[in-house]
Each structure stands twice: as C-alpha cells, then as structure tokens.
Image (cartoon, rainbow, N blue to C red):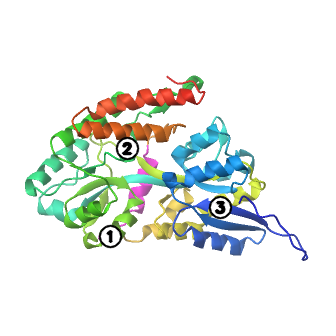
C-alpha cells in the first residue's frame, strides 16, 4: 500500500503516512526512531524478500497496479530497469546542494540518469582483502599487494596444505567477478552520444578474466559458491585463506564462521600495478520513490534522514547493512570500534579509503540481470572445459547489446 490517507476527526492536522519496502536487518529500529522524532510524517516498514528473490517483481507489479509503496529499497544495478519503465520519481526538485554534497560523486553518479536523480544512496560495498593472518604467518607468506603476488601466494598455499586454497571462484554468481573487473578501470557500459556502448571485452576486463582462468586451470582456487554452509566450513577450517570481498560480508562471515574469529585481518585489494590504489564496490543499495508517491517531499525527507542521521546510521551499521553511502556516515563512531572478528583491527580508514578509490564512471544498465545470467551460464561452461572466461565475456557482451535493443534503446 502506497500511502495511508489521513483520517479521523480530532483537532490538528493528521501526519502524512508513508510505506517503505525494505529488507535491511535493523531497519525497523531506525524507522521507529524516525517516527518518534517526526510527528508530522509516519512511516510503516514492510519487510520484503531481498533482490531477485521476489522483491523486485513485487515492486514492478505494485507500480503497474497503482498500489505501490511510496518508498522502496533497491540495489543500484536495478535502478535502470525501473527507470526504463518510468517507475521511479525524480528526486531532483526536493534535494538541495548540501544534500548532494554529503555523498561521494561516484556514488551519486550511480543514482543519476540523464540529469535526473532517482534515489538516495543508502549503503555501498567497498572491497578489501580479508585474509587469515595466522595461516599466512605460519606458512611465511606475505600479504599480497598485487594480483601477481596474490597468485604467488596461492601457489605457496597449495604447497603448504593440499586441502587449502587462497579463495573460491563461484560460477553461479558473476557479481564478484564484475566488481573485480570494475577495479581494473574500464566501465562495462558507456552511454556517450545517447548510445549504450558495451565494453565487456575491453583489454582491462579481458585481463581480469584471463587471470582467473589461469588460476582455475592451475588449481589455485577452489571452484565453489560463496556464502554457503560449505564455504563457511572452509573459512573456519582454513580451507579458504584470502577472500577479496565487500565490507558488508564481514558480519556474515563472523556470524557463520565463529571458530575463525580473531584470526582474520583486512588489507587493501591487490593491485594490477605495484603502487596502485584502485578499489572496487560489490553490492550496495539506495532508497527510491516509486511512481504514484503522493507525498514526494516528505518521502525524500525520510530517505535523507534514514541514510544520514547519525543515530539511524549507527543502528544500520550494527545490523551489518553495509558501508554508509553518506560521507558524514563514514565518520560514525560505530565504525571506529575494533573488530573482534579481525583480532581487534580498526578498519574505518581502510574502508573509507577503499570507498574513495573506487574508479568513477561505472554505469549500470537496464538489462543487468540478463547479463549476469548469461555470464553465470557461460562461466559454468568455462569451468567444465567447454570454453573460457574470456569467451563468456564475449557472449555476455553480444547478449547485452541484443537485450538493450529489445528495450527500444540504441546499443552497440
């Protein structure tokens, strides 16, 4: 339900009532705080399945039926598909320059299309290398600072323990690979001249694909999905030693691999060139307004507050929702606390730097889900020896152009 109309006969104006669809743990506490401190706006939180488990389909259907909520949590990569169907509200008229200035330009670019702003950034996924400090010390392996050193460390790990791998490669989920391609510096989509130019097979992305192809061929990585019971077992046992992953994954790892707590540390992502500083983002979401919202000004006030107010940000950080998108949120005291999972390491500066060092210019596209599907399917073929990861990129590039054209857009 989009909006509960004010009703009743008492003295004084009734508050504007809004509904918010979201899946972030702990969001209920932040919404409760907003309601206690904003008597003129009251928000009802409805929990929905995250991502493609049903939440987005429900949103599309609700907009089409005219029964959508006013506010919805949405991953950055999903915004273009909703925008293409004219299902989002442009927030531009309700934002000030100060509002915009509280977000990094690269993050703000992810919610801006053709001069319009279609969401308030909520959380991002700056990446780092999580590694088992105890095992690297035991095997006299230094923390890799380049991808070449990462490969060398992988070789030493396999020699030190035949049951251990430096990390896993998940054929069923292309998202981690896409993030590492982002780090390499060439966006997969360029929208110059009002044409969607697909660049999945750029030299930078091909280099990333070839690196992981060689790691797989040489049995230096374990081919297995992440965030599964078997993966957590490997984290606990030392079967997986150094994982490039987003900051939000730490809470998941801590909850599901408690036996390894205190043994992990975090460091910057390995670089393609010595002395490089590029990072990447994996995941992240924003608060958008769906078509039909009758009180956009109040809805934007809530979207800004929930993602910028220090008390709200602290509550969301505690729930493990991800790295704050707002610059002011990155200095939240909750982030400076030592991490027990990381043996007391403080990572606020590490992830602030990582967030600042994500290459700008990345653009999400309206057929992202289809691209991920074809990539995952072709990754499976590559892992079975029928093709290669570079071949998968070529197939995904061709399919992406075809699918964007089916949307009535120019693509090449």
Q: Nearer the viewer, mark 1 or mark 3?
A: 3
When asked about the image quadrant of residue 236, the answer is bottom left
Q: Which residue is at a point 48% across and 32% down the rendered structure image? A: 189
| 321 on left or right of 144 | right
**Extent of the magenta region:** 341-358
- The residue indicated by pointer 1 is 341
- The residue indicated by pointer 3 is 20
Q: Say which label, 1 or 3, has the lower sequence index.
A: 3
Q: Which of marks 1 and 2 is in front?
A: 2
Q: Which residue is at a point 77% across and 56% down the rendered structure image? A: 295
Where residue 112 appears, as percent x and y from the top left, is: 61, 41
| 75 on left or right of 235 | right
Q: What element carries label 2?
A: loop
When asked about the image quadrant of residue 32, the answer is bottom right
Where residue 219 appears, as percent x and y from the top left, is: 16, 45
Disc number for residue 174: 2
Q: Is mark 1 on a helix, strand or loop?
A: loop
Verify whether residue 348 appears in magenta. yes
The image shows residue 132, relative to residue 179, as above or below, that is: below
Estimate the spatial distance between the alpha carbons at disc 2 and disc 3, rounded to whole Å.
29 Å
**Disc count in the image?**
3
Specify whether residue 365 is in view.
Answer: yes
């Amino acid at each position: 339900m989009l909006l509960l109309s004010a009703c009743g006969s008492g003295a004084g104006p009734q508050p504007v009532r809004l509904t918010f669809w979201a899946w972030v743990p702990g969001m209920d506490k932040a919404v409760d705080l907003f309601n206690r401190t904003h008597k003129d706006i009251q928000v009802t939180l409805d929990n929905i399945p995250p991502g493609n488990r049903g939440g987005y389909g429900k949103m599309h259907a609700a907009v089409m039926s005219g029964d959508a909520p006013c506010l919805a949590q949405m991953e950055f990569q999903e915004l273009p598909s909703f925008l293409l169907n004219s299902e989002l509200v442009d927030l531009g008229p309700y934002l000030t320059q100060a509002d915009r200035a509280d977000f990094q330009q690269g993050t703000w670019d992810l919610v801006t299309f053709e001069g319009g702003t279609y969401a308030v950034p909520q959380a991002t996924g700056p990446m780092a290398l999580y590694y088992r400090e105890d095992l690297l010390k035991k095997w006299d392996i230094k923390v890799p600072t380049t991808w070449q050193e990462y490969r060398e460390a992988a070789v030493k790990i396999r020699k030190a323990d035949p049951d251990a791998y430096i990390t896993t490669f998940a054929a069923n989920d292309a998202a981690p690979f896409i993030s590492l391609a982002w780090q390499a510096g060439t966006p997969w989509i360029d929208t110059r001249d009002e044409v969607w130019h697909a660049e999945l097979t750029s030299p930078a992305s091909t280099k990333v694909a070839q690196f992981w192809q060689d790691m797989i061929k040489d049995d230096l990585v374990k081919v297995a999905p992440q965030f599964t019971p078997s993966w957590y077992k490997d984290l606990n046992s030392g079967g997986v030693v150094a994982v490039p992953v987003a900051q939000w994954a730490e809470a998941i790892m801590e909850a599901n691999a408690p036996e390894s707590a205190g043994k992990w540390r975090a460091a910057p992502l390995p670089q393609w060139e010595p002395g490089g500083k590029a990072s990447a983002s994996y995941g992240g979401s924003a608060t958008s307004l769906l078509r039909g919202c009758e009180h956009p000004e109040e809805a934007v006030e809530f979207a800004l507050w929930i993602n910028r107010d220090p008390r709200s940000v602290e509550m969301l950080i505690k729930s493990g929702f991800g790295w704050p998108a707002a610059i002011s949120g990155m200095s939240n005291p909750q982030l400076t606390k030592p991490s027990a999972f990381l043996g007391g390491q403080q990572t606020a500066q590490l992830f602030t730097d990582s967030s600042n060092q994500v290459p700008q210019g990345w653009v999400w596209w309206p057929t992202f889900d289809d691209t991920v599907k074809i990539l995952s399917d072709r990754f499976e073929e590559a892992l079975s020896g029928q093709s290669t990861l570079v071949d998968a990129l070529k197939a995904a590039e061709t399919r992406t152009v075809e699918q964007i054209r089916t949307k009535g857009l120019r693509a090449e």
